[in-house]
Image (cartoon, rainbow, N blue to C red):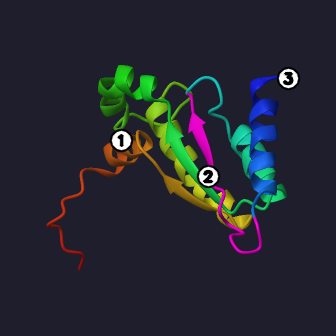
Amino acid sequence: MDKFEEARETLRRYAAAQTSIRPNAVRSKYIIVPGINDREEYIMEWLYMCKEFKIISVILNLDFNWIINNTELAYKQKDMPRGKDNTTLKLYDLIEFTKREGLKLGIRTSLYGEIFTIKTIVEGEISLNEIEE
């Protein structure tokens, strides 16, 4: 059994344990590993699986080792054109893609941990003192 099938079986068992009292107790976590599972079709496969198991919440994260080893690169790439070699903007686009496609399936996406670094790098620093007009 490959690792995806192993994860699928584990998620299926957890989802099956949900009860009518707590029907949305299980949330799945998708960790993006650049160069391994960072394609839209892989994310869609995960989202469809969650829908099949009646899981309506997905947590999106980024591989810790990638961000630790590539933070400087990520800052450089944020102002470069989009392209196959621009991992930073590709990751940012995957965040938006996952949120958008998840909503179409009735699945909420939340961001966790290292993926916030990509969002912050691309969108800019957010000050707590900033007032929206």
Q: Is residue 91 left or right of residue 44?
A: left
Q: Is residue 3 left or right of residue 37?
A: right
Front-most of 133 and 63? 63
- Relative image position of residue 80 (x, y in whole percent): 38, 34
**The N terminus sits in image quarter:** top right
How far is mark 2 from mark 1, CA to CA?
17 Å
The answer to which quarter of the image holds residue 25 is: bottom right
Front-most of 61 and 72? 61
How far is mark 1 from mark 3, CA to CA?
33 Å
Front-most of 22 and 87? 22
Front-most of 110 and 10? 10
Of the residues tagged 1 and 3, which is closer to the observer?
A: 3
Q: Which mark is residue 1?
A: 3
Residue shown at 49% from the left, 30% from the top? 63
Specify which label sits upstream in the sequence, 2 or 1: 2
Specify which label sits upstream in the sequence, 1 or 3: 3
Q: Residues within 10 Å of mark 1 (few under 14, many from 20)?
A: many
Q: Is residue 83 left or right of residue 129?
A: right
The answer to which quarter of the image holds residue 84 is: top right
- Relative image position of residue 70 (x, y in whole percent): 37, 23
Could you tell me which secondary element the residue under label 2 belongs to? helix
Mark 2, residue position: 98
Could you tell me which secondary element the residue under label 1 belongs to? helix
Mark 1, residue position: 117
Q: Amino acid at mark 2?
A: Thr
Magenta region, main secondary structure: loop
Give the extent of the magenta segment: 19-33
**The C terminus sits in image quarter:** bottom left
Q: Amino acid at mark 1?
A: Thr
The answer to whether residue 131 is above or below residue 122 is below
How far is mark 3 from mark 2, CA to CA?
26 Å
